[in-house]
Structures are given as C-alpha cells and as structure tokens.
Image (cartoon, rainbow, N blue to C red):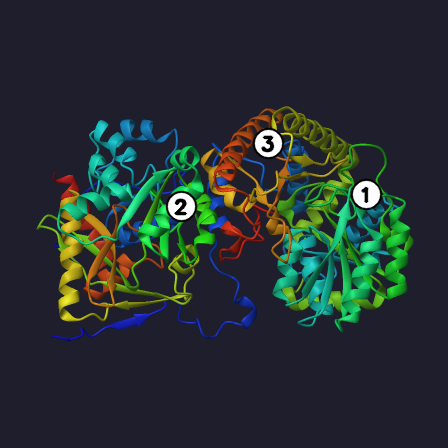
Amino acid sequence: MGAVVTSGRVLVLAGGLSHERDVSLRSGRRVSEAMRSAGLEIEERDVDAALLPTLSDEPPACVVPMLHGETGEDGAIREVLELLDVPYVGSRPADCRTAFDKPVAKTIVRRAGVNTPEWYCLPHETFRELGANAVMVALVAKLGLPLMVKPARSGSALGCTVVHDAAELPAAMVNAFAYGSVALLEQFIDGDEVAVPVIDDGSGPRALPAVAIKPDGGVYDYTARYTAGSTQFVVPAQLTSEATAEVARVALAAHEALGLRDLSRSDLIVDRDGVVWFLEVNVAPGFTETSTVPLSLQAAGLDLGKVLASLVDAATSR
Amino acid sequence: MTEISPSSSTRLDNYVDRYAARTKGMTASEIRALFAVASRPEVVSLAGGMPNISGLPLDVVSHAISELITNDGPTAMQYGSGQGTPELREQICDIMRLEGIEAHPDDVVVTVGSQQAVDLVTRIFIDPGDVVLCEAPSYVGALGVFRAYEADVVHIEMDEHGLVPEALEQAIVATQASGHTIKFLYTIPNFHNPAGVTLSAERRPEILRICRAADILILEDNPYGLLGFDGAPHRALRADEAEGVIYLGSFSKTFAPGFRVGWALAPHAVREKLVLAQESATLCPPAFSQMAISAYLKNHDWQGQIKQFREMYRERRDAMVGALTDLMPPSCRWNVPDGGFYVWLTLPPGIDAKAMLPRAVTARVAYVPGTAFFADGFGSGSIRLSFCYPTPERIREGVRRLAGVLEQELELRETFGSLPQTHGLAERRGYDGPSTDMT
C-alpha cells in the first residue's frame, strides 16, 4: 500500500432506507474520516432521488458504498453504478446478490469444500400451505435443538433468534419473517464465533487476523453488536495454529467461491473440536466504532484510511 | 500444534467498569435503530410527536428576535436567573389563568422544556426504590426520567374518561401495604400522551380527593391543555388544589419546541428546591429563549395562533380517524381524541406491535409500539399513532400502508398461531426510549 494516487472526489454512500440505516450512517462517518486522514477528498451522501443526477452531472472519481442491508448489500446500488460507469469499491452486483442471500451463499461455499451448518430455507407461504406445526416439527426433528432462525437476507443479526425449545420456534419464525419473506433455519453450532476480513488491494486476496467475539450475554445480537462495552473482542483470536490457518483458508475460500472483490468479512464458528464452520459473508462489512474489521486491520498493523485509499486506487484503475 | 498467537482483548469502551449501575439498561436497541429510517421523507412517520410549526408567523418571530438582539442583546446572551426571567413568569401566570389557575410568578420555575421540569421534580423527590404512580400507558419521556432515578413505576388503569379513581385507590392501598413509599402521582389529564384521552370533569375532584386523603403529591403534566378541539380549556387540577399539585407547562406545543422552554408551578417550599436543583443542573434556563418567547407573547396574537394550531390538528385528527375507520380491520380499536396529537390503537389479539415494526418500516410507515409507554413490559398489543405532523393526505397514506402491514401480520398469526404477548422483540434487549422520535 503506497501513497494515495486517486485524485478527485470520492463519494461515500451511507444511510439508505434499509433496517440498517443507522449502522450504515455510522460506518460511513468512520470510513469518511479515515479516508480524509489519508488525504482523499471525501463527500458523504445518502441515497435518495437526487443521487443519480449528482452521479451523472458531477461524476466522482470513485464511490465507496457503505450501505448495509438490502439495496446496499444485495447489489442494487452497485448495478446502478455499473450502469453509469462510475468506479466503486467492492464486489460486483451479481456476486453481491449471491453473497447477500444466505442460503445461496451457503450452497456455493459448501460446494467449494467448506463446512457450513446444515440448513433449510423456507418462505412463509410454505408454512401456511402445509401447516406450520407439521413443518416446524419436521425441522426440529432434522436440525435438533438449539437451532438458529434467521431472515434469508438481512444483516446485523436483525430478526435472528437462537431457539432452545420447540415452543419458542413460532415466535422466532414471526420475528424472522418481519424482516423478509424467506427464513433460514440452521443447525446451531456451539463454539467460538470469529470474524475474518479478506482484503484485496490489487495484489490478491488475503485474510486478515481473525477477531474472536465474546458477547456478555452469550448471543451476538443487535444490542451486543452496537453497545460499546457489551462484547469482548480478542484479536487475533486465540486459536490453535491449525484453527488460525483454517479460519483464514475458509474466509478466503468463501471470498473466492462467491467471486467477491476488494473486501469481505466472513462470520465463522470454530467448534469444540476445532472444526471451522461458515455462517455468512458480508460484502459491505460494518466500520462502526464497535465493528470487527477495523479491529482486525489494527491488529495487522494497517491504517484504516490507507487501506481504504488503496482499495479506492484499485477501483479507479480497473 | 497448540501455539497461540499473542492477542489483545478489548471491549471498545475504556470506561465499561466505571459507569453507574443505573446505566445498565442504556444499550443499543433494534427499535431505536429502526427510527433512523423513519426520518426519511419516503416514510410516513406516524411515530414522533413533533409539533407542526409550519403555520408559525416566522416574520413576526424573526422581527421579535431581531429587536431583542438590537435592544437587549447583552442581557439576552448573558446568564440569567435560575428561576427564569420575571417577565416570562408573569406571562406564564396569564397563560395558566386560561385553565383556572391563579398563581404568583414567584412560584413559577422556568425550565428547559417541561421535560426538564419532570427531571427536576424527580431529582428532588425520588430515592431509589420509591414509587411513582403513572397512568397505563404513560409518557415515554417521563418513564425514562423515572427509570434514570431508579424509581419503581406502578401503572394505574385508564379508560375513555382518563385515570380510573377506583384503580388509583386500589393501587395506593396495595403499594403502601407492600411497604413501598409513593412519592407522587404523575398524570397527563388533557389529551393524554400516548392514550389521547382526557380526564373527565367529574373525575378531577375525585382524583384530588384520593390523593389528598393519601397525602400523595400530584405532578400534573399539561403540555397539550390549550390544544383542545372543542370548547374552552379544561380546568386544571392545580386550579383547585394549590398545595398538593405541581403543575408543568410548556411552550413546545403552543409555540415552538426549539426554544426549549417549559415551566413548573410548585408550592413555595418545593419551588425553592426546584430552583436550587435547576441551578445545579443548568445554572439557569436560557435567557435568550425566554426573552424571545416573552417578545412573541407580547407582540403577537398568540391565542389566535393557538386557535390556528387547533384547527390544523383537528383536520389531521379527522383525517386519521377517517382513514382508520375506512381501512383498518374490524378487530382494531382506537379512541377519538378531543385534542392533542395522539390516537391509541389496540391491535387485533395476538399481534405484537414491536415485532411488527420492521415490516412497517419496510412498508415505509412508522409508529411507536405500545411497550415504550409502559415501565413493566406491557403494551405490546397497542401502538401510538401521531397525527400532528404529516399532512392529511400523508396521514391517510400512512394508515393505508399500516393496514397492509397489519394484514400481512394477521396472515403470519394465522400461520403460526397467537403468540404470547411477551414473545418476539418484546423480549429483546436494548433501551427503547425516550428519543425525539417517540416523545
């Protein structure tokens, strides 16, 4: 990572209309500050009806999408950037769509030889048409308890519930369906949760130090993610050398199998036997004050602003 | 084989072990995060109780402020009295006279919005574990203050005529029998936030009698009292009981919230302590705001302005009630408020207002789940709808969207059965209020 070469205005997109707007605004602010420190000219901007005219009339040198949740991570906004030939940091639209859809991403990553917890993915209609009780009984019988219920497409643990008792399952399903029409039910893996960023500034993807996540309440939910002090982060994660190598391999394998570009963060579990399980990957990982990617960069001895500037350079030279 | 890399551990908060115990619940919440979306223009927000001040005569205000700076700038921009400016306190007495209150300006303490008055009163009366009696539901901003001072809140039943006297009596007996100390009754008698109901004239003396007999102070919060849609303002509780009532008023709804000026009218001894508490909290309420409001009251037909506000809010109330009648499923119930900003809507049985909120935000409509207005986790079957800010057309559109959301939620309930009201997001962690989106 050398000196910044990109000249001209870099547009940081943050906010949007997803359920993660608040998180996105915080990520956007931090990323903008870091890139300004690195010498880039930054404009922060929300996504609204005036965005397209701005992109057309005053095209920026590059866009850094810090939009979380739908439209940010499902590739939609990047499709628009492609349409307008505006360079941007991050993965291509089709790959975002694949990665953002947890069941699809799990399928692809499993095919690449990576462990991922057993899962079933069902829309609300299936429960309605076949009878929710019968379907839920079958799911519990197959996946066992506890199990995870998640919206198929969402972030920040919104709509996610650990179900310990079958009686809790209907409420967990309703909770997941509040965020989308399709739910993912997944075998619960007991172990250490780690986040592993992958970065590629033009010299090939490489995994950064794993961050171990130890929430006080045992569950890394929205509150644990965004309340400073409520989660202990250990970086690099205290893992055996084999597990350290394996989490890096899995994060890289997921990044490559999904065709991702520039930056991703894989969320993994290292179980009690040291087996590494892939849960999901984020194409627009958080950069808030309590997010894991900045911690990992710091542990690697990297400056956040310079890393982002190098990604901007890579994007503008594509 | 088992080499471990040198690691460092962080909680990303260097002060995590040093916060006061009462901050324990002050955590990030999914619900509060969802309100970030509600501020976008695409969303019809029926959530926040933001006064609609678009009808204010900005030229008059601008002229008054310009004159103030020209003529009294050095005083207006200087520290002032901890009790508030004498001129404004006199004007406040004139305003309170509209509700039957005869008071002396010496007994008025100007505060930073009436929200600060709630804080100051709680600060001087509440020890941890003391009980505050509140209506069920109650104002989220007051509940936040009571929580911060570690008070125990006991909710009292309301009906369409306001606080139920028999329920108040029973709660007093039960609370005292359990060995707890009741410090005051917090009540919003007019156009209640969030319930929208008004304490009937018949019940007012009854409430005063019960509290007098039990030696319980009343904290009468009356920000909406002049915003009734029909007839003269209701007679304040304080009008008939000077010693046992602390009355709170505000310019936030009758003028503009940005000035942050409210007041407390208190018995002499209490007032002395409120002034000292005010001085330790802020030294003094903002002189500039007070003098600007004084100039506005002196030079403008402020009562005419309030009349205009009332007409505007009445039109919006009619729009909301009309849309609810036309669009909501028959199993929903709501009240028709005679003033103020709010409709309290009870959802069909089994629907959890908190769990439904993400779906509503996806549909671009926002409301405040009823749980925000209870200190004890109740209220998941209700929502508060504000009609004060959006135009009548937007209100109707918001209700239309909400009806669609409710239809989907009813389908889910049909699929998965009625859920206990404590399930779903109601059980999730996080500090849900107060914020300006909810007050």
Q: Earlier in the sequence, mark 3 or mark 1?
A: 1
Picture quadrant of residue A64: top left
Q: Position of residue B198 (x, y in %)?
A: 79, 43
Which chain is indicated by disc 3?
A: B
Q: CA distance from mark 3 to mark 1?
A: 27 Å
Location of residue A251 with respect to A62 vertically, above or below: below
Pointer 2 and pointer 3: residues touching (CB < 8 Å)? no
* Quadrant where the image shows the C terminus of chain A: top left
Location of mark 3 (residue): B390
Q: CA distance from mark 2 to mark 3?
A: 42 Å
Which tag is nearer the camera, tag 3 or tag 1? 1
Q: Is residue A39 left or right of residue B27?
A: left
Which residue: 54% across, 53% down? B432
Which residue: 31% across, 49% down? A32
Q: Is residue B188 left or right of residue B9?
A: right
Pointer 1 and pointer 2: residues touching (CB < 8 Å)? no
Location of mark 1 (residue): B161
Q: CA distance from mark 1 to mark 2?
A: 46 Å
Location of mark 2 (residue): A136
Location of residue B23 with respect to B98 vertically, above or below: below
**Which of A22 and A241 lies nearest the eye of the viewer?**
A241
Q: Is residue B416 visible?
A: yes
Q: Position of residue B428 (x, y in %)?
A: 49, 55
